Amino acid sequence: MIATLLLGLVRQDPAYNIKYVQQNMKDNFDFDISYHKAWHALKAAREEVYGIWESSVQKLSKFMAALQKSNPGQWLHLDTDRPNLKILNYVFCAFRACFERFHYCRNLISINGTHLYTKYKHKLLVAVTLDANQQILPIAFALVDE
């Protein structure tokens, strides 16, 4: 019930958090809900709006095949735990136009990573450089297992 009330709010603001859920219930319905109930309601609303992680991994292999077909020559690799389970180990992507343009850039690469705080604890790694116009050029990115 609470999740259906949150659908519009989650669509508007993907970063909508549990404290906002609790405050929204208090302000609009004069009803206090526990952190646990707010967490479950927010999780259900996000799954309704954005889908669940497991189904997204199922779609990722089809997306990458279409991406490879429309942009030949790029480096794409998707590795899953087992073909039937589709548990993501890592994804690597380097677009051909970007790494061909890299030859005309400075000989300096910046690599950065960030933790993705999801159920599966992945890290997003990005390699970039600066081109002659001082613009950031993404060379490659990877989503890796912790």
Image: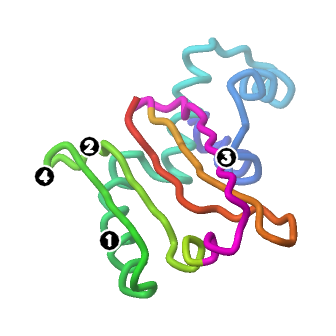
Q: Amino acid at mark 3?
A: Ser
Q: Which residues are magenta?
A: 101-121
Q: Is the N terminus in the top left, top right, bottom left or bottom right quadrant?
A: top right
Distance, label 3 to label 4, CA atoms, is 36 Å
Q: Amino acid at mark 2?
A: Ile
Pointer 2 and pointer 3: residues touching (CB < 8 Å)? no
Question: Going 61% across and 73% down the picture, which residue do you hit?
Answer: 103
- Is 110 one of the magenta-colored residues? yes
Pick out the residue farthest to the front: 107
Pick whichever of labels 2 and 3 is earlier in the sequence.
2
Q: Residues within 10 Å of mark 4 (few under 14, many from 20)?
A: few
Q: According to the image, label 4 marks what residue?
A: 84
Task: Give above or below for 32 relative to 42.
Answer: above
Q: Which is in the foreground here, disc 3 or disc 4?
A: 3
In the rendering, which numbered label is found on residue 62?
1
Q: Is the C terminus in the top left, top right, bottom left or bottom right quadrant?
A: top left
Pointer 1 and pointer 3: residues touching (CB < 8 Å)? no
Q: Amino acid at mark 1?
A: Lys
Q: According to the image, label 3 marks what residue?
A: 110
Question: Going 56% across and 53% down the picture, which residue do you hit?
Answer: 49
Q: According to the image, label 2 marks what residue?
A: 87
Q: Which SS class for mark 3? A: strand
Distance, label 1 to label 3, CA atoms, is 30 Å
Residue 18 in the image: x percent, y percent? 68, 24
Distance, label 2 to label 3, CA atoms, is 29 Å
